[in-house]
Amino acid sequence: MSVSYDPEAGDAVWLDFTPHAGHETAGRHPAIVLTPRAYQVATGLALVVPVTTKAKGGSFEVPIRGAKRLKGVALANELRTIDFAARQAEKFDDCPIEVLAKIRDIGEALLRSIDK
């Protein structure tokens, strides 16, 4: 994809997650874009969650079923804001709408559960 690529919610993209810290996902991994294209165009940023094929059975893992090329589980608790151009985002598939909805539900529940 060119630098002018503007991800859309539900895009499955390859990203470089390095640099990272601690237990965060690192290296080149697939990710699912959560925010709409208008947000990306306005800010140059996107909210994503990484995808891994190394499922551990965690309660925040969302199995990906029904995609053409995207495989594994989405790590719905690892919400990341990224500069998609700097991290060289490349779209390779579309995330099924049911999977995207489940990831968003978990993310919203996490944010709502934070004590004020």
Image (cartoon, grey):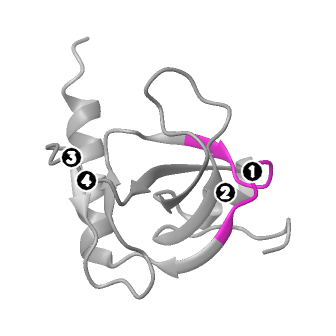
Q: Which mark is residue 56?
A: 3
The first of marks 4 and 2 along the sequence is 2
Q: Amino acid at mark 1?
A: Gly
**Helix, strand or loop status at disc 3:** loop
The label on residue 55 is 4
Q: CA distance from mark 3 to mark 4?
A: 4 Å
Based on the displayed image, in which of its 4 quarters is residue 40 positioned? bottom right
Quadrant where the image shows the C terminus = top left
Query: Dot 1 lies on which element?
Result: loop
Q: Nearer the viewer, residue 47 or 55?
A: 55
* Secondary structure at numbered mark 2: helix
Give the magenta range.
81-90
Q: Nearer the viewer, mark 1 or mark 4?
A: 4
Distance between the alpha carbons at the discs numbered 4 and 2: 29 Å
Packing grade of label 1 (10 A; few <14, some 14-19, many >=20) is some
Q: Residue furthest front?
A: 54
The amino acid sitting under disc 3 is Lys
Which residue: 35% across, 60% down?
53
Q: CA distance from mark 1 to mark 4?
A: 31 Å
Q: Nearer the viewer, mark 4 or mark 2?
A: 4
What numbered label is drawn on residue 40? Answer: 2
